[in-house]
Amino acid sequence: MKEAILKEFNTNAFQKDLVTWFIENQRELPWRENKDPYRVWVSEIMLQQTRVDTVIPYYTNFMREFPKLEDLAYANEEQILKAWEGLGYYSRVRNLQSAVREVVENYQGQVPETRGEISQLKGVGPYTAGAILSIAFGKVEPAVDGNVMRVLSRALDIEEDIAKPKTRKIFEDALYELIPQADPSSFNQGLMELGALVCTPTSPGCLLCPVREHCRAYERGKQSQLPVKTKKKSQKIKKMNVLMVWNDQSELIIEKRPEKGLLAGLWQFPYLETSTLENEVDLVRKEVESFLETELSSFEGPIDVIDHVFSHLKWEIHVYQAKISDQMKLRQNQIWVSEKDIERYAFPVSFQKIISNQLMKG
DNA sequence: AACCCGTGGAA
DNA sequence: TTTCCAAGGGT
């Protein structure tokens, strides 16, 4: 079946044209300064489902804070979450640190160079394994990401649904035949760079494409119909009343989210999930007093309304402000923080917005 | 296999 | 405004 896909495809010319184009047209990016496996690794984790422009400042900061693999291995959790704050998919940085620690312990600090070993590290899947192996070590290994599936679905006219997990293997199998022995790094990066800059999801720039003459979709005028990708289902909505609770010392309550699941380990203000009914301030106040098990000296809101959109979920956040005059007992995951110290903690973007709207007005 | 896990930018 | 999506992996 591999033979069928690549039959009458000019593999050698495709490789040469793509690699030549990449070498001459690649962007200057911070993770391309050298081939340090640790630097390549960090970049590949950050780039998972995340745009280059978004990653660049995070990567620069991360490398300044954790220049070497050991620096990350010995860092604490607050430090790594703060460095990742706002980048999303926070389990990535936990898994990365866990994996880096394993490399320190079991591989003398040297990133393993085989697919079998590197794939066992947390957070390193088939794509990331291939990317690190080819880019950092020059290994002849495929790295199939969304770009690669899009580019190859067009070049080879493959109509399999790229939203389905098993489809990735079709491209991987084809790539073992297609990838050049000479410069697998430039070839893999070239496929991705082409997908990012030319062979884009909508309105691909075929007239500028270095492999246009090899492209079956272009030849057949169907480049805009590929790749085939089914839609995913819509998100659920959760409404919540978020509480900014102040004491007499101008401190407010923040709490740490659970270590697993959504936004794991990040900090937030306490909140109540609400019904779809319209909220009446006095009603909310009673709920809050019951929830906090204390009397409030004042209560107002909503002082802010924010939507937090996830890939699979949406929060509709109403922010209320409360003041207490007596002592109150905190839950185990809660602490009092001053306005000044709050920036030491990592928050989801929605709470960053609340903080910036309410606390940094000056 | 299907679902969970963030965010911000573009169409 | 809504939808889609971007160098995916874990479960």
Image: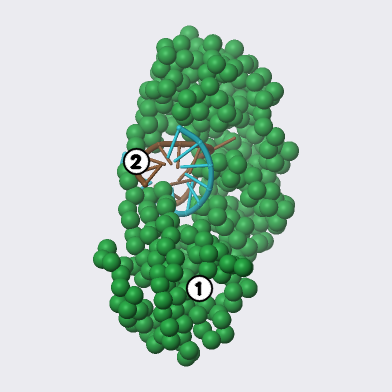
Chain colours: A green, B cyan, C brown
Q: Nearer the viewer, residue A205 or A101?
A: A205
Q: Quadrant of the C terminus of chain A?
A: bottom right
Image point (40%, 31%), residue name: A162
Q: Which residue is mark 2?
A: A232
Residue at the front extreme, as displayed: A362
Image point (65%, 21%), residue name: A21
Residue at the bottom extreme, as displayed: A326
Dot 1: within a 10 Å radius of its alpha carbon, few (fewer than 14), some, or many (20 or more) residues?
many
Q: Quadrant of the N terminus of chain A?
A: top left
- The answer to whether residue A148 of the structure is visible from this angle is no
Would residue A329 appear left or right of A339 to someone viewing this image? left
Alpha carbons under labels 2 and 1: distance apart: 34 Å
Image point (42%, 14%), residue name: A221
Residue at the left extreme, as displayed: A277
- The answer to whether residue A28 of the structure is visible from this angle is yes
Q: Earlier in the sequence, mark 2 or mark 1?
A: 2
Label 2 amino acid? Lys
For numbered disc 2, what is the local secondary structure? loop
Q: Quadrant of residue A276?
A: bottom left
Label 1 amino acid? Ile
Q: Which residue is mark 1?
A: A254
- Tags 2 and 1 on a common chain: yes
Q: Quadrant of residue A86?
A: bottom right
Is there CB contact under 8 Å for labels 2 and 1?
no
Image point (47%, 70%), residue name: A269
Dot 2: within a 10 Å radius of its alpha carbon, few (fewer than 14), some, or many (20 or more) residues?
few
Q: Nearer the viewer, residue A163 or A52?
A: A52
